[in-house]
Amino acid sequence: MRYSDYLSFTIILFIFLTACREETPKSPPREITPEPVAIEKDTVPEESEPEEEPFVLTEDNAIDFFFDYQKGLQENKVRLTTSLGNFTVQLYDNVPYHKANFIYLTKQGYFDMTMFHRVVKNFIIQGGNADNKETAEKRRKLGRYLLPPDTRKGYRHHRGTISMPSSEMDNPHMLASPYEFFIVVTKPGSYHLDGNYTPFGRVIEGMDVVDKINSQPVDDGDWPSQNIYILKAEVIE
């Protein structure tokens, strides 16, 4: 056999054997996990709890509320920070509704940014109101109510006494307006107020600031010519 014929035979044989040999897989077989398919579900909204109605004081619930509120109420001092200085009042424990009301309103932030809106020379300063929407909105949220007078505890309107004015509403029984208060500056006092208004505390620190407020110029309606703010009221003990 010639060399060329031998070479051709060898090449043909190699090609034949290669074609017949089973191809070896490149990697072991594996299970193909299909991508997860999102399945639509009928969704039912969860039941939401009904919003709790905000508590609002009324003529019907105020007395019961303050009766409960004053139980065990040990705090009896409130510091008022004004635009003219600070003073502190101590509240009488045996005038429970008026004390509880003043503490409650203080903790609710009602007095913050109200004003001393009435100043009568050598008589009183009166605070707890303001000619702005914010104060009216605070009153709306807290509620509309009055407090009964409590004038038989033996307290008189000495200088430095904090007392509650009566409401301007139709009010034959002299029920107290809960959002306002006045402080007597008269020496030694304004005793003609006894029996008609309820003293519920006294100034124990900062009476000079009360006098300073009382000395400010006012217009014909006893409203101070420059606003005198209660910047903050806080229960201190």
Image (spheres, helix red, strand yellow):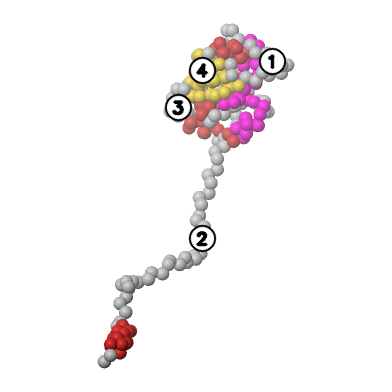
Which residue is labeled 2 in the image?
44
- Circle 1: is it few (<14), some (14-19), or many (20+) Cα within 10 Å? some
Q: Secondary structure at mark 1?
A: loop
Residue drawn at point x = 50 percent, y = 56 percent: 46
Q: Residues within 10 Å of mark 2 (few under 14, many from 20)?
A: few
Kindly state the secondary structure of the residue where label 3 is placed: loop
Give the residue type at disc 2: Val
Structural distance between the alpha carbons of marks 1 and 4: 24 Å
**Residue 103 vs residue 31, the one in the foreground:** 31
SS type, badge 2: loop
The answer to which quarter of the image holds residue 22 is: bottom left
Give, as a single range, the part of the protein colored magenta. Answer: 112-140
Q: Earlier in the sequence, mark 4 or mark 2?
A: 2
Q: Is residue 129 magenta?
A: yes
Residue 88, label in figure: 4
Picture coordinates of residue 57, whole percent (x, y): 57, 35
Tag 3: amino acid:
Leu
* Percent coordinates x, y for residue 75 in the rendering: 45, 24
Determine the residue positioned at 57% across, 29% down: 110
- Asked if residue 5 lies left or right of residue 165, the reply is left
Q: Residues within 10 Å of mark 4 (few under 14, many from 20)?
A: many
Callouts 1 and 4 close, C-beta under 8 Å: no
Name the residue nearer the viewer: 59 or 24: 24
- Name the residue that disc number 3 marks: 73
Residue type, label 1: Val
Q: Earlier in the sequence, mark 1 or mark 3?
A: 3
Q: Is residue 122 visible?
A: yes
Is 124 inside the magenta-drawn segment?
Answer: yes
